[in-house]
């Protein structure tokens, strides 16, 4: 499983888009990019995942670069409840092992 | 449809004791992974179970062991507890059918070793 690198912290104004970057330059062809968030040390909450195409769901959008070495999670209209630690992992569920980094602490401010 | 459920939610043990944590995967899921999360850090992979066997293991000593039952539920056992084993223990479940499955986490079991 590939190592991912994220900025330790980011701020975002309420109502604005939050763009969270992730570097995964050693990602292999069969590894997906997954995003999770964790609030107050509850269990990580699944947000979105993708292989090479951009993905969108009711929570967020995932933009993956063409070379797949980096990605961006977009929360289109951040709210105070989006304040959390966001984790990006590169993972193949058939391989079993996954590696989390320390994530990005996103603080949404009024 | 219940998600991933873990028990107990909180427990306190004494150094040297043994602990068993339990996990029921999301309905329809057949694969269970366990993680340890120390305060202020990301989750660290312990091991994964599929078809009642340990498939992958992270960098954890043999004091950490597990089991998966035919109904896909799983247990994490930690022997000879150390103070450093105090952490949030997370269970995640998925379906082994394809490589891009959604993985769901439980709310975790908080273990304090005193």
Image (cartoon, grey):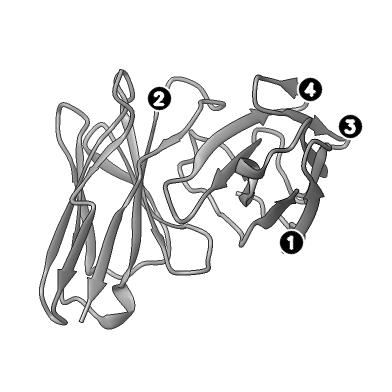
> In what element is the residue under mark 1?
strand
Question: Which residue position is annotated with label 3?
Answer: A66
Q: Nearer the viewer, residue A19 or A15?
A: A15
**Callouts 3 and 4 in the same chain:** yes
Instruction: Check the image and report above or below for B102 versus A39.
Output: above
**Callouts 4 and 1 in the same chain:** yes
Residue A99 placement: quadrant: bottom right
Q: Nearer the viewer, residue B54 or B4?
A: B4
The x, y position of residue B5, in whole percent, is: 26, 37
Q: Residue at x 24, y 80 (%)?
A: B82
Q: Pinpoint the chain carrying mark 1.
A: A
**Callouts 2 and 1 in the same chain:** no
Q: Pinpoint the chain carrying mark 3.
A: A
The x, y position of residue B114, in whole percent, is: 20, 82
Question: Which residue position is annotated with label 2?
Answer: B95
Question: Which numbered mark, 2 or 1, is in the foreground of this view?
Answer: 1
Question: Which residue position is annotated with label 1?
Answer: A9
The Cα–Cα distance between marks 2 and 3, rounded to whole angstroms, is: 28 Å
> Along the polypeptide, which appears first: circle 3 or circle 4?
4
Badge 3 crowding class, 10 Å Cα cut-off, few under 14, some 14 to 19, many 20 or more, is few
Q: Residue at x 41, y 26 (%)?
A: B96
């Amino acid at each position: 499983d590939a190592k991912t690198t994220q900025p330790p912290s980011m701020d975002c104004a309420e109502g604005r888009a939050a763009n969270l970057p992730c570097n995964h330059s050693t990602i292999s062809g069969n590894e997906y990019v997954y995003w999770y968030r964790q609030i107050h040390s509850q269990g990580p909450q699944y947000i979105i995942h993708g292989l090479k195409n951009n993905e969108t769901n009711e929570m967020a959008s995932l933009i993956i670069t063409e070379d797949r070495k980096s990605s961006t999670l977009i929360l289109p209209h951040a709210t105070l409840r989006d304040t959390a630690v966001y984790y990006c992992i590169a993972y193949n569920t058939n391989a079993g092992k996954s590696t989390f980094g320390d994530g990005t602490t996103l603080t949404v401010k009024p | 449809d219940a998600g991933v459920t873990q028990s107990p939610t909180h427990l306190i043990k004494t150094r040297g004791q043994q602990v068993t944590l339990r996990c029921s995967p999301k309905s329809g899921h057949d694969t269970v992974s366990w993680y340890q999360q120390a305060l202020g850090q990301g989750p660290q992979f312990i091991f994964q179970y599929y078809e009642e066997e340990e498939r992958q293991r992270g960098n954890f000593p043999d004091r950490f062991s597990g089991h998966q039952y035919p109904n896909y539920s799983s247990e994490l056992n930690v022997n000879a507890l150390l103070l450093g084993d105090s952490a949030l223990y997370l269970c995640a479940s998925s379906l082994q059918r394809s490589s891009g499955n959604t993985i769901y986490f439980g709310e975790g079991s908080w273990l304090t070793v005193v």
